[in-house]
Image: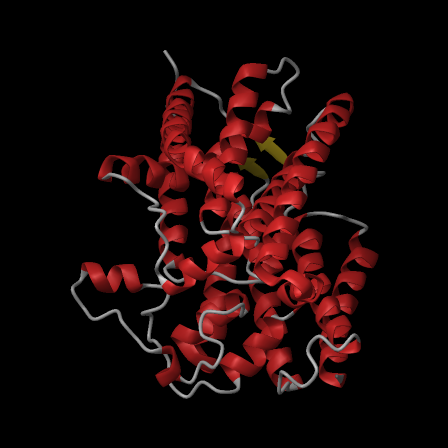
Amino acid sequence: MIESILNACFYISTLGLYYYKTKRVDLYFTVLSAYTAVALLGTYNYFIGVFNDDYHLSIFRLLYLFVVVMICISPLQKVDFKSKDISIIDNRYITVLLLFFIVCGVITISFTLPKAIMLQSIGEWGELRSDVYSGDSTITLYDSQLERFFHNCFSYLLPFGCIMAFYQLTKLKINLWLTSILFTLISLNAYASATLVASRGMIMMFAVKMLILYMIFRKQIPNYRKKYIAIVVSFVALFLISYTMAVTESRFSDESNESLYYYLGHSMFAFDDGIMRTMHDYAGGRYQFGWLFRILGVGSEFNWLNLGCTHGTAFMTFVGNLYVDFGPFFTPVVAIFMSMLLSKYTSKCRYQLSDLIIIAFAATWYAEGVFVFSGDQSLQWLMVFVVSFIVKVLECKRSN
């Protein structure tokens, strides 16, 4: 109990001190608030008896987690949209890339949405999730390699598409059709992806992503337009909340409330007890770089239990993902490298589209990373840098 209280104090004091010094509610504040909320909910779960004696906590391990998180997200403190400009070059080359994103999105949604609607009508979320865990799900994510291609292109271009969607809201003369298409595709993709695996986390991650992007552009969006945005967000939020509650009720029935508290508040403790306390061997890159091992023809398989992970792939924060691969000594080294890399973008005086793609992705990734990630996240990072580089090249071209 005392460890969970002290853990919450780490985040509360840091968040309070940051706001006291800067008086800013910005990207850093938003991301740190997510960790503070999870830490507080973890403590609350102990008070109401959800956790009981489920975890063997150590203040040292929780402090280790806190320090690594602070190292990674510290570059976001440099992102100040009050004193720094956003300069997005909207030339014909960027427009062509945006149209390709839309085409990929339409094709992807045309395949996934009918499956999602069918599952929504059945409503057997608990059974579906059990099938997903056991590998017996009859729902195929891809019906062809062509569908897989467009789905991957849409996914990798999603940070670019999201930035362009919110950028439309800042224009004095808004293209209503283009803006509606972009937000519809982004929203339907999140809904369909979550529905196909009866996931609550994907819905939460979608909400986090939208909040991060709004924080980036909120100063540039006209105030009168924010009222309409609030109305649309309210309707979407009601639908997503009703979906989340239906999935929770189906999967956990009478324990649905406790399951939701547990779901949102246990990731830090899972890292402490199930990863850092028990691990005696490490994956050596096979968890986050498994895709590269497979390309090279090197064995990418590893056994969680043999490594000592008692929680498997359960919620363990993004630090847990790094720790599984790199262990206690090299995880902070990787965190410092990631921090230095992100600082190259956040420390700029003017942010271009290619910069915002990296900043928005990183802020979203760290905010979502308070919960859980699957393996091969390094591929996501690689592709977002590839997309940013492509956009950087296109930004330098002049329309004739």
Q: Tell me: 59 left or right of 99.
A: right
Q: Residue furthest left?
A: 297
Q: Residue at left 52%, top 50%?
A: 124
Residue 14: image quadrant is bottom right
Residue 111 falls in image quadrant: top left
- Residue 148: percent from the left, percent from the top? 29, 40
Q: Tell me the residue at 77%/71% (across/down).
A: 44
| Residue 194 appears in the picture as rendered | yes
Residue 271 vs 31, above or below: the answer is: below
Q: Is residue 211 left or right of residue 376?
A: right
* Screen quadrant of the N terminus: bottom right
What residue is shown at x 71% (from left), y 62% (from top)?
A: 257
Q: Quadrant of residue 2?
A: bottom right
Residue 324 at x, y percent in the picture: 42, 75
Q: Nearer the viewer, residue 120 or 369?
A: 120
How many callouts does the rendering have? Answer: 0
Nearer to us in this view, 34 or 314: 314
Residue at screen point 57% across, 47% down: 203
Indicate left or right for 348 with 15 as reference. Answer: left
Q: Which of the two residues, 292 or 38, is positioned nearer the viewer here?
A: 38
Relative horizontal placement of residue 29, taking residue 365 as reference (left or right): right
